[in-house]
């Protein structure tokens, strides 16, 4: 086997000229390769290692197939990846190159393997083909043939890694885009102060829920709720206290309605609740429980305060065409509650 007899880049440049490739293009694809070289002849092994190290700095060697297979497994356990290329002689004591290649390919079927042999044996070639090994070089190996093979394999590996990187990048970008879409949808449909549905989401689903209830002949009750004298609370104590009052109302409502109920903030201190699959008395009782729990004296940010709510109710009728029909009737009942005593429910 003939290898470089002197450390001279000019010799490499001559070889590259024969290969019709420049130094930069070859080293671009070979400098990152990790190689396991298996050869029992010490002199050949050292000469090959010296040659390969000029283009592929990450090289490990083994003296026979058994040691090669063990190093292959150990490399994965340490680095969580495989060697890019395994270069092996065929005839070796203890375990030959073909047997080792078979074991390696059972572990990693896509492993790139280059087989070197001094014998152009048809039996070896057939066995290599059956194993899926496509790289075979006869000894003595010509430097340009070896480097050309490394270049081609390196190019294929680099292309595969770049494809994998780009695929992962696309997956990451898709994931980030999906999260941004979800976040934008949340921002567009969620009340930022309380986290419940806003006016936009309510009207998106309100008509659908109303139509479904009519088709299934299921009861539906809509309540419009607002906080009594809320403007006075804001003017007297400030908007921070007003915001906290709204949060208390939302927290209380959430405790007393089930998951099927539709609860939304229409704006300011006005809220809507839609309750299905219940009787009129049960629906009124749920809102009455909320009203009573709200109507207590409490400390809010160091200020002792008592606030109340009023509500108007409307029940679904077959003649209703949109959820606005329900809201109009509920608003009328809310107006009656506010005009009389406040802190009450009308329906």
Image (cartoon, helix red, strand yellow):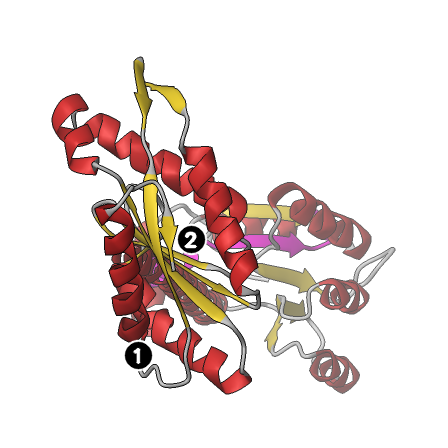
Nearest to the observer: residue 182 or residue 220: 220
How far across and down, in percent of the image, does residue 322 sit?
Answer: 30, 79
Q: Is residue 210 visible?
A: yes
Q: Residue at horizontal 77%, vertical 67%?
A: 106
Give the residue at mark 1. 322
Image position of 155 with respect to 304: above or below: below
Where's residue 79, x and y in %?
60, 44
Query: Is residue 24 visible from the viewing direction of this image?
Result: no
Q: Badge 2 is on which residue?
A: 55
Residue 93 or 128: which is nearer the viewer?
Answer: 128
Outermost residue toward the left in this view: 235
Which quadrant of the rendered structure holds the N terminus? Answer: bottom right
> Where residue 249 sits in the image (x, y, percent)?
38, 39
Read off the magenta span. Answer: 25-43
Q: Residue at x 49, y 86 (%)?
A: 215
Q: Are marks 2 and 1 in contact (CB under 8 Å)?
A: no
Q: Residue most toward the top?
A: 302
Outermost residue toward the right in this view: 94
Quadrant of residue 245 within the rendered picture = top left
Residue 294 sits inside the magenta stretch: no
- Left or right of 24 on screen, residue 4: right
Q: Residue at x 32, y 83 (%)?
A: 321
Please count the marks in the image: 2
Which mark lies nearer to you, 2 or 1? Answer: 1
Q: Which secondary structure lies at badge 1? A: loop
37 drawn magenta = yes
């Amino acid at each position: 086997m003939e290898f470089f007899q002197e450390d001279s880049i000019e010799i490499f440049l001559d070889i590259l000229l024969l290969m019709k490739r420049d130094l930069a293009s070859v080293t671009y694809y070979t400098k990152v390769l990790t190689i396991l070289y298996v050869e029992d002849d010490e002199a050949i092994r050292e000469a090959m290692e010296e040659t390969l190290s000029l283009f592929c700095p990450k090289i490990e060697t083994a003296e026979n197939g058994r040691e090669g297979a063990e190093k292959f497994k150990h490399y994965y356990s340490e680095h969580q990846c495989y060697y890019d290329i395994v270069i092996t002689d065929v005839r070796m004591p203890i375990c030959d190159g073909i047997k080792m290649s078979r074991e390696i390919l059972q572990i990693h079927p896509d492993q790139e393997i280059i087989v070197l042999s001094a014998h152009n044996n048809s039996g070896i070639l057939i066995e290599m083909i059956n194993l899926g090994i496509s790289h075979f070089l006869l000894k003595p190996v010509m430097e340009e043939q070896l480097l050309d093979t490394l270049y081609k394999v390196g190019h294929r590996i680099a292309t595969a890694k770049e494809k994998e990187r780009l695929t992962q990048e696309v997956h990451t970008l898709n994931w980030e885009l999906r999260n941004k879409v979800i976040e934008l949808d949340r921002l567009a449909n969620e009340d930022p102060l309380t986290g419940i549905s806003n006016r936009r989401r309510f009207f998106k689903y309100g008509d659908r829920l109303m139509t479904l209830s009519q088709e299934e002949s299921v009861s539906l009750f809509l309540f419009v709720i607002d906080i009594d004298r809320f403007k006075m609370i804001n003017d007297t104590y400030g908007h921070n206290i007003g915001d906290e009052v709204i949060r208390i109302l939302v927290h209380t409502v959430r405790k007393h309605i089930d998951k099927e109920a539709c609860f939304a903030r229409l704006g300011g201190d006005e809220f809507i609740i839609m309750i299905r699959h219940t009787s009129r008395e049960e629906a009124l009782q749920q809102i009455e429980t909320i009203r009573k729990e709200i109507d207590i004296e409490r400390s809010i940010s160091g200020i002792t305060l008592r606030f109340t709510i009023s509500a108007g109710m409307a029940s679904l009728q077959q003649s209703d065409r949109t959820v606005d029909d329900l809201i109009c009737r509920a608003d009328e009942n809310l107006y009656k509650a506010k005009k009389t005593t406040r802190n009450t429910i009308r329906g």
